[in-house]
Image (spheres, grey):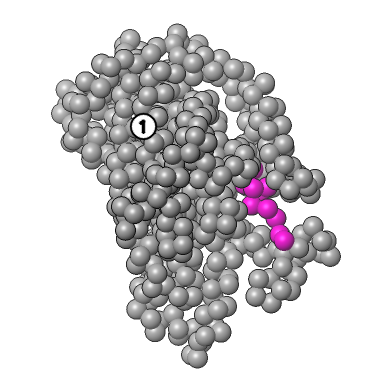
Amino acid sequence: MIGEMLYSGAILMASPEVLLLTFLGVILGLVIGALPGLGPLMGVVLLLPVALYVEPLAGLGLLIAVFVGGSCGGAISAILLRIPGTPIAAATLFDGYPMAQKGRAADALGLAICASSIGGLFGGLLLILFAPLLAAFATRFGPPELTLLGVLGLLSIAVVSREATTKGLLAGMLGMLIATIGTDELSTGYRFTFDSYQMLNGFHIVSIVVGLFAVSEMAWQLIGRDKITGEVPKPARPGLRSLKLIAGHIPNLLRSSTIGTFFGTLPGAGGDISAFTSYAVAKAVAKPEEGYGEGAEGGVVATEAANNATCGGALIPTLSLGIPGDATTAVLMGALLILGLFPGPALFADRPEVVGGIFLVYILANLFLLVLGFLLVPVFVRLLRLPKSSLIPTILVLCAIGTFALQSSVFDLWVMFGFGLLGILLRAADYPLAPVVIGTILGPIVENNFRRSMLISREGLWIFTDRPISMVLLVLCIGLVALAVFVGLRGKALKETVKEA
């Protein structure tokens, strides 16, 4: 099955358009990742409108390549400026920046690029092996199982909202409320449209995502006047010596890649958690003379291998179950839905060639990352000199053009700016943004399948306990709620302890 899927996917991937857009996506991802304040999520959001105007696999190749390149690009500014371009690169500066201070910037950059590429390939291998198996198992799912699976996804995203469990849950509920706007799928009745024909189909997911993340992020940076004030060092191109250096860290590389893939499969965990965890594990098993925190090569390898392996891991639940692994894969899932490709078992059964193409495009993007990272690092370093006073308006204009071009609708622009304002308010109140998007995507899945479950049930809600798989999912949901309560109480106790001290 996997062989046939990859063979049919290879035929689609052989298209010049797919290869070119994947190539360009890695370059753009590296650039966006290297510029502090942006990152892979922002890159995927900005290029989402573009991806909808090309062949499906070409568009997905562009977005996945940006995801891969952006996850590595943050290491460039972390190593050279001690400013992580993305949150997932924060752990890289522990040893990457000290290496640069010791005159080993080229070695640090080379190790980061090699580890990212190899970690990404490791995650891609597990993606190819496990995603079809998980999707095959999910073919047993009916409306009750799909309902609880959606609830599990919502709870998972909210639970890992970092010391803001309640706020994460509320943000997810807000997303579900937003998803109810428009025409009801089952009854064809109108909900919250306020007699406006423009709202009959609800809000376009691209307008929501671009406004919530891109517009609010740019406005937030303008408000905070976040600028690079440090001196940008001279460009340093990594050499083949980096391949020799990485060969001395194979155990660390494999261990960190495994950790990254594991955390990627956990919805909402993200690359920053996996990077810090793998760094902690690598430091714990390292010898004292390796000097972690003072420019240890193993520190750079551990963090970069983990954060890029997370990309492949995050795609496993996204493609096989329709549960986004993180905020970026939530946007990718939105792109799939817009293109008429529904993540889950149906995608593997109905469009195996597209799934195989996605697998191969992800592998290709990581191979491109290894080559392009070595060749173009000096160019990316020069881009760090761009003033944000020029960069931010350019990004906002691109957001407006891309959103308007979707449906040639001014209403979509107003929706984009409206969600941009909502994003600013949520940021100001320390509410996470990702659960809003997850709730918007998973909300209709939960609602429609719950209603179908009630229609076929003769015993009301007991249908969720009568079936073995749904019962297991229900127990998992209850477990996640219990975990959320425990984490919340523990966090409150720690705060009180600190306050007393």
Q: Quadrant of the N terminus?
A: bottom left
Q: Would you say residue 485 is visible in this rendering?
A: no
Q: Would you say residue 139 is visible in this rendering?
A: yes
Query: Is 132 covered by the magenta stretch?
Result: no
Q: Quadrant of the C terminus?
A: top left
| Residue displayed at 38% across by 62% down | 135
Expressed as whole percent of the image width and height from the top left, the position of residue 173 reads 59, 61
- Work out whether 387 lies above or below 501: above
| Residue displayed at 72% across by 36% down | 401
Instruction: Give the residues in magenta.
Output: 201-210
Q: Quadrant of residue 213?
A: top right
Expressed as whole percent of the image width and height from the top left, the position of residue 490 reads 39, 55
| Amino acid at dot 1 | Leu
| Residue displayed at 32% across by 38% down | 121
Expressed as whole percent of the image width and height from the top left, the position of residue 286 reads 18, 31
Pick whichever, 292 or 268, lies toward us.
268
Pick whichever, 51 or 200, lies toward us.
51
Q: Quadrant of residue 309?
A: top left
Element under disc 1: helix
For label 1, count other residues whose C-alpha is less than 10 Å away and answer few (under 14), some (14-19) or many (20+): some
Residue highlighted by disc 1: 367
Toward the bottom, the furthest residue is 458
Most prominent secondary structure in the magenta stretch? Answer: helix
Query: Is 208 covered by the magenta stretch?
Result: yes
- Work out whether 79 lies above or below 205: above
